[in-house]
Amino acid sequence: MSTTAKTSRSPAFLGVFLLFLGVAMIAGGWLIPSRFKSVPFGVVREAGQAGDSVSDLAKRTLLDGNFGAAALEAEAAIEISDEKGGFVASQVAMELEANPQLARWGAWDPFLEAALKTVPLEDYSTEPGTLGILLSKSCRTAVSGLLENSRNPLVQDFRATGEFTTYRRLFPVSSTSGRPLEVTLHALGLLAQGGHISDDLRMQLRELILEAKATGAIGQLEDFYLDSLSLMRLFDWGQLKEIFIRLDSTDEVKRLRYLLHRRADDQALVYAMSLASRDVSTLFDYLESFGDAGFERLRSSLATGVEGYRLALREQLPIEIETLEEAGALISRVQAGIAPFSLQNPKLSLAFKYSLFFSGSFVALWGFSLFGRFYRETISPILALTQRFFGATASVLVFAVLSEPFLAISGAFEGYNFSFVLPVLTQVDGELQIVETTPSTSMEPATLLSIAFFFLLQALVFLICMLKVREIEKRDLDPLVKLRLMENEENLFDSGLYVGIAGTCISLVMQVIGIVEANLLAAYSSNLFGILCVAIVKIRLVRPYKTKLIMAGEEQIVGLSKES
């Protein structure tokens, strides 16, 4: 074999090697479970396996003596297929069967014991939850006798609001229809007396009551009473006091009430999610952003463990349901092996992922450029490096869109509104949702990413055109020859327009077939950037240089004519 043949083949072999190496690096980056706009399920699962399960929380609550809360947590554990949930539920049932009083209360409480110790169970109301404990006349009388001697300022504030006449949906305690308000105030008084109301909520309630005493404005306080009454119908005393200590504002009480009615079939799961949250407001914020789909993803994350669920709430990002497990056991094992690193070093993992995307694209483009062709135009190393650099950068943007499932899909989630009104008292369990829309002046991340991608493409085209002009300028040729070379590159100088039109067409086709969400701004930005790029290249770059060449060629012709 001749030396020329070996030399001609070696770039092709090197090109194949570099191409496969680049593709392998891109694939490696793709397998790293790290995202900008979502949390991979593998990372959530890794976090969840390192902590307690819901059944562990239920067991701890059971040992603490709160059988009502433990029962709901155990029920939630069974719903998410926690193996130990059924065992904890049977333990709770055994304890409640042995103590009918606790079965009705859900948990022992010293002040409830002091108030109702002489009231038999037969005198309780048949209504569910805490409402059934306090609604009957004998129970109301007993609790009222206990609270009227209390020195707790908040308890006295609650009692003072019982005779306000500015209520719109409730009636004063002394009226014939005042039982709902009376029961609500008694339950809240017992919570305050036992220290089961958080400090932040306690301070807010005292402020509202003081304002109501001074101005008669009872609206927000009345809403809180109605929300509390609704929770009393759903939860027994043990469950009620366990949840109230975690609510830091009247708004959180309202949002919990809304969520419990919105997810009426998942009340045990909502309760367990609320108790498992370090800050229950993060749960409401998450669902306000992601709605029903977000609730299902939280259900899946809670099934992995409490820490996985808390990770989802802490990040406030959608959970990416893992799909690569179906591709094979090898890919699953690789991702499972990388998940601990991504969990412990999220920023470093993400940087490493996109570094592999960039490096792999750069190497692949380098290898692709080495394949033999019938005609190869010799270009400067600077131009070749620029093409690969910007090509790799554009590829990273493409891979970002393809690997981030929620980046290019704006409006994929319909969040909860968490607002409603109660027109009449008899509709305590229903709500009329008020939907408010606020005009937004911000762009979706997918739109910004698309515009940035098209701008980057046109920047690449401009640099290539500029380097081509500089390359022609540096050649040791006559001005007229350089002018002919510039005319030969007219298609290159118009390439910005071709790229812009192609980008717009591809975007519109992808929007029509549903790959990406319809967005005309992102699509037509490609055409706009193409027009601007060609205008800048032709007017600010090509035209002045051609003028210079024409003038130099004219001087050369004049000089030759004088010599002749």
Image: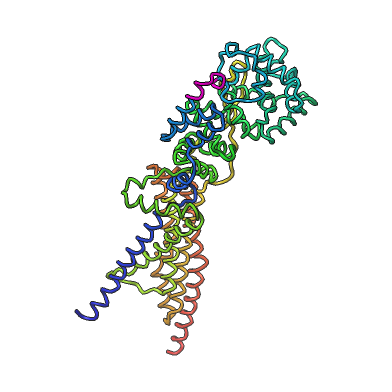
Q: Is residue 470 above or below residue 197?
A: below
The structure's colour scheme is rainbow
x then y, percent, for residue 188: 67, 24
> Principal SS element in the magenta part?
helix
Say if residue 363 shows up in the picture: yes
Please tell me whether residue 458 is drawn above or below residue 8 in the rendered image: above
In the displayed orientation, state which residue is furthest to the right.
214
Q: Position of residue 529 (x, y in %)?
A: 49, 56
Compare residues 502 and 258 and report the one nearer the observer. Answer: 258
Looking at the rendering, in which quadrant would you find the C terminus? bottom left
| Name of the residue lying farthest toward the left | 1
Q: Which residues are magenta?
A: 94-103
- Name the residue rendered at 35%, 72% in the picture: 377
Judge left or right: residue 338 versus residue 2. right
Compare residues 508 and 495 and report the one nearer the observer. Answer: 508
Q: Is residue 148 left or right of residue 33?
A: right
Image point (63%, 14%), residue name: 119
Q: Is residue 100 magenta?
A: yes
Q: In the rendered image, which quarter contains the N terminus?
A: bottom left
Residue drawn at x 46%, y 33% is 77
Percent x, y for residue 296?
Answer: 46, 36
Instruction: Please indicate, yes or no, whether residue 501 appears anywhere in the rendered image.
Output: no
Residue that sits furthest to the front in the current view: 98
Which residue appears farthest toward the top when viewing the image? Answer: 176
Give how far across and how far down residue 402 sits, in percent: 41, 51
Q: Residue at x 44, y 82 (%)?
A: 557
Residue 330 part of the magenta-drawn span = no
Q: Nearer the viewer, residue 263 or 556?
A: 263
